[in-house]
Amino acid sequence: MKTLERLRSNQNLVIQSHVQDDFSGYIFLRSGNSRVFNFYAHPSAQYNGTLWEHVGVTNIMDIDAPPTWEEMREVKDTFWYPDEEVHIILPSAKELSPLKTPYKNHRFYLHLWRPLKGWLYS
């Protein structure tokens, strides 16, 4: 995941809150319909003994319109380097989200994840 300093230099990203390692704000995506999304980023979230990098996004202009594939790709490219692989994980019904974010039940809040130690197959 890119450093906070590098992310702050991105003109399409507005970081409004920064508490410990977690930060949130707005991201202006140029792909698709040039929409604005709210994001939460957690560079070192712990879940079941594993540390994860996590970014979740939701459309703030139309809460019933989830991000498109192109928009999620742009989110990935904004927060991670080209050689870093991230996944969209659809958790079980029991665990709606590895992070207990306030938006875990929002059906159009999509999440990107990357384990800090890498994927098992890498």
Image (cartoon, grey):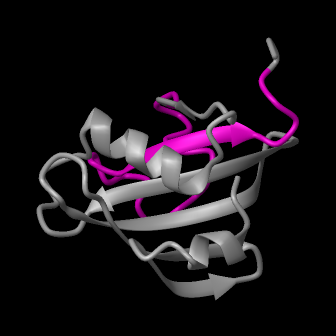
**79, 38: nearer the viewer:** 79
The number of numbered badges drawn on the structure is 0
Name the side, left or right, on which 48 lies relative to 66: right
Name the side, left or right, on which 116 lies relative to 113: right
Name the side, left or right, on which 105 lies relative to 42: left
Q: Position of residue 81 (x, y in %)?
A: 65, 45
Residue 122 lies, with reference to residue 42, above or below; the image says above
- Look at 29% across and 37% down and name the residue there: 70
Q: Quadrant of residue 12?
A: bottom left
Q: Position of residue 80 (x, y in %)?
A: 62, 49
* Residue 114: in magenta span: yes
Q: Quadrant of residue 84?
A: top right
Residue 99 lies, with reference to residue 11, above or below; the image says above
Q: Which residues are magenta?
A: 91-119
State the predominant SS element of the stretch in magenta.
Answer: loop
Q: Position of residue 78 (x, y in %)?
A: 51, 55
Q: Position of residue 87 (x, y in %)?
A: 56, 30
Residue 94 lies, with reference to residue 36, above or below; the image says above
**60, 92: nearer the viewer:** 60
- Look at 51% across and 66% down and name the residue there: 40
Residue 4 lies, with reference to residue 55, above or below; the image says below
**85, 12: nearer the viewer:** 12
Quadrant where the image shows the C terminus: top right
- Look at 69% across and 59% down and name the residue there: 2
- Look at 40% across and 47% down and name the residue there: 74
